Image (tube, helix red, strand yellow):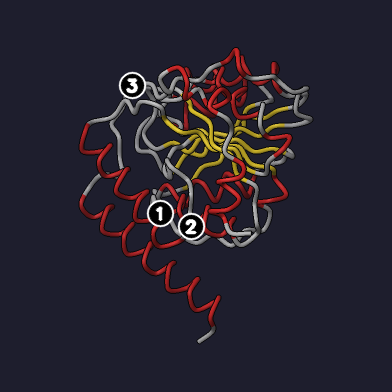
Amino acid sequence: MTVAEAAASARPSAAASGAENGGQPNEAAVTWPAKLSGLTIFLPSYNEAGNVERVVRGFLAEAPKIAEDFEVIVVDDGSRDRTAEIAGRLAAEDSHVRLERHAVNQGYGAAMITGFRTARQPFILLADGDGQFDPSEMRLLTALIPNYDVVIGRRARRADHVVRRFNGKAWTILSRILFGLSVTDMDCGFKLFRRDVVANLDLHSNSAMITTELMARLAGRNARIAEVDVTHLPRVAGVQGGNSVASIIGAFKDLFLLYWQLKRARYGG
């Protein structure tokens, strides 16, 4: 089964996704499962000193409601502000918190790879460290994970500048064309995985292209994928990265390189 087939068959009903109430998550339509046995929440973070404490504490408050055991990992990607200092203090105060730090900035992809590599629990939640996702909406993803390998957030209304929304839409369309992916919000930074489906996954991209690489390689593992609408909150502190000309060019370069790598692997040569 291709990822397109898997995602098409796995996409939840209109009631579960919230499509029937204007695209907002419909909590009443979701039946919550029993708690997960264990959950790693990892937060890729770069210069998020104004957000990191609020975000970590938000996940710490919600995690016990959905998991018997849990950890929150701040992956500091060589921040030049106090992100690592604040995360280190939180880790000293609470044993559920860990800090993984890159000595220098390596890129969003490298932070994601570190998050997957260092996760210890059987389920792994990616949540960007900028505070644009509501920790209480983890339940929207965990409600579907008993039947799927991956549950992907789909931002019902993106709280971003129009240029960023346009770039995200164009990126998703191109990724769908090149890789046959059915994911409708490729770069949403709110995703839940079974650890065994991402274990030893061969990921290479250090750029924002990591999300497409991740989904394309999961397609090779016939992962069962579902999408569900989630709320996207405005950024209240810090500056969004990854939108510079150099970053965009690098991501597109990685995208086409991955396309040719997977094509050669499939057809030889």
Of mark 2 and mark 3, the one earlier in the sequence is: 2
Residue 164 is left or right of residue 258, and the answer is left
Which residue does the numbered mark 3 point to in the structure image?
234
User: Real-space Cα distance between discs 2 and 3?
Assistant: 27 Å
Residue 179: give its label.
none
Name of the residue lying farthest toward the bottom: 269
Which residue does the numbered mark 1 point to in the structure image?
209
* Residue at image coords 55%, 46%: 8
Q: Secondary structure at mark 2?
A: helix
Residue 139 is left or right of residue 169, and the answer is right
Which residue does the numbered mark 2 point to in the structure image?
213
* Residue at image coords 57%, 30%: 13
* Residue at image coords 52%, 39%: 75
* Residue 245 locus on image (x, y percent): 20, 52
* Residue at image coords 40%, 27%: 156
Of mark 3 and mark 1, the one earlier in the sequence is: 1
Confirm or deny contact between disc 2 and disc 1 (CB under 8 A): yes
Of residues 37 and 95, the one drawn nearer to the viewer in this rendering:
37
